[in-house]
Image (spheres, rainbow, N blue to C red):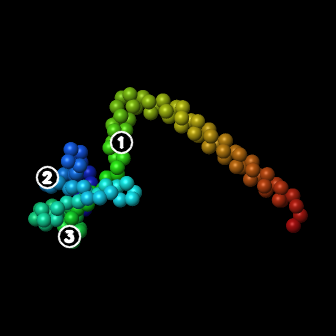
Amino acid sequence: MMRKSKFVHDAEVDGYRCPEGQLLTYATTDRNGYRHYTSDPAICRDCPLLASCTTNGKAVRTITRHVWADARERTDANRLKPWGKAVYKRRKETVERMRAAKAVCLELVISSKSMAYVMRYSDFPH
């Protein structure tokens, strides 16, 4: 089946364009926040790429896109710019180190509580 990356999102018409130029129009949004775009089966039945595009018996291709996909694409674009790489490098040096230190401290606390539990109940004769 043809990958979603072969389809191009067209924000102006709120749809996707397939490799053959067909517009997949907005159909619905599900409870998980995914917008569903479907093709027109009357056009897809005669498409030369139908066999590689969909296995649907009704000749309908559906593409999903999360409602926050635009924000994610903007964030990814910023992260890949030179200043975004510099910020990420700095984040690794500060935030990630603090998270690792917190995890180590938390593990020590859990370990010390576990040892206290083991010691407390192993002192009693069975």
Residue 3 appears in the figure: no
Earlier in the chain: of badge 3 and badge 2, it is 2
Q: Secondary structure at mark 3?
A: loop
Q: Is residue 57 left or right of residue 117?
A: left
Q: Quadrant of the N terminus?
A: bottom left
Residue sitting farthest toward the right: 125
Inter-mark Cα distance, 1 to 3: 33 Å
Residue drawn where x is 23% and y is 68% of the image: 56
The residue tagged 2 is 21
Q: Amino acid at mark 3?
A: Lys
The residue tagged 1 is 71
Earlier in the chain: of badge 1 and badge 2, it is 2
Q: Amino acid at mark 2?
A: Gly
Question: In which image quadrant can residue 61 be found?
Answer: bottom left
Residue drawn where x is 35% and y is 42% of the image: 71
Binning the other alpha carbons within 10 Å of mark 3 as few (below 14), some (14 to 19) or many (20 upward) gives: few
Camera-near label (1 vs 2) is 1
- Measured as percent of width and height from the top left, residue 34 is found at 34, 55
- Measured as percent of width and height from the top left, residue 13 is found at 20, 48
Q: Amino acid at mark 1?
A: Ala
Q: Is residue 44 left or right of residue 38?
A: left
Q: Is residue 114 left or right of residue 72?
A: right
| Number of the label disc, if any, that sits on residue 97 | none
Residue drawn where x is 17% and y is 62% of the image: 40
Q: Secondary structure at mark 1?
A: helix
The residue tagged 3 is 58
